[in-house]
Amino acid sequence: MNSELLQMLSQRRPKETLLDFCTHSNCWKDLVPIANSKDKNLAWRAVWLLTFLSEEDLSALEINPLELMERARKQGGSFQREAFKLLEKLSLTEEAYGYYMEWATEVWCQLKNPSSVRIAALRAMVRVGQRYPELLPEIKELGHKEWLEGLSPAIGKQAQGIFAGLASYA
């Protein structure tokens, strides 16, 4: 494993510094095993950095979406938020879409989750709903007031906007 990269990730550094380092040292591929490491902080930072790559660059890294989802499900918190962002850029199989929807619904319905994690889960559910429109009624049901409780005011407005946008789907 790239020890210089591990050192960079183990310290708080500005996003630009980390992105420049990964670009100049071409260590993007090294982030994938770090994202699967047991060190939660390193894993979170690795997934976060991977979210800045293009879909094309990510496909070359051969990230396994199911493994990423399983890891995020276990790790929780900010790792989940970044995993949702990363998964938006990855190609998913039909099986992976099913797992993605199940996990995203679970995260959305856990009212104790941070607002930023819950809104990422909602966006994931909408992504699945756009691919599988028969799921949209189920997603719309999760927009009732009781599910919006606990969200910060700004994220609550975002969620209301997302659900209002779903109303336009048949």
Image (tube, rainbow, N blue to C red):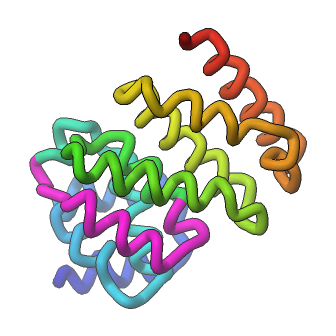
Residue 113 x, y percent position in the rendering: 71, 65
Name the residue rendered at 49%, 78% in the picture: 75
In this orientation, which residue lies closer to the viewer: 99 or 92?
99
Residue furthest bottom in the image: 38
Answer with left or right where residue 67 lies relative to residue 18.
left
Residue 80 sits above or below residue 145 on the image = below
Residue 77 x, y percent position in the rendering: 60, 70
Q: Is residue 134 magenta?
A: no
In this orientation, which residue lies closer to the viewer: 168 or 65?
168
Residue 59 sits above or below residue 71 on the image = above
Quadrant, the C terminus: top right
Characterize the magenta stretch by its predominant secondary structure.
helix
Name the residue rendered at 77%, 68% in the picture: 112
Answer with left or right where residue 61 lies relative to residue 49.
left
Quadrant, the N terminus: bottom left
Residue 114 sits above or below residue 3 on the image = above
Residue 134 x, y percent position in the rendering: 44, 27
In this rendering, the count of numbered labels is 0
Residue 108 x, y percent position in the rendering: 64, 54
Name the residue rendered at 37%, 29% in the picture: 132
Residue 164 sits above or below residue 8 on the image = above
Name the residue rendered at 73%, 24% in the picture: 161
Residue 25 in view, yes or no: no
- In the image, the segment drawn in magenta is 60-80
Residue 13 in view, yes or no: yes
In this orientation, which residue lies closer to the viewer: 96 or 32?
96
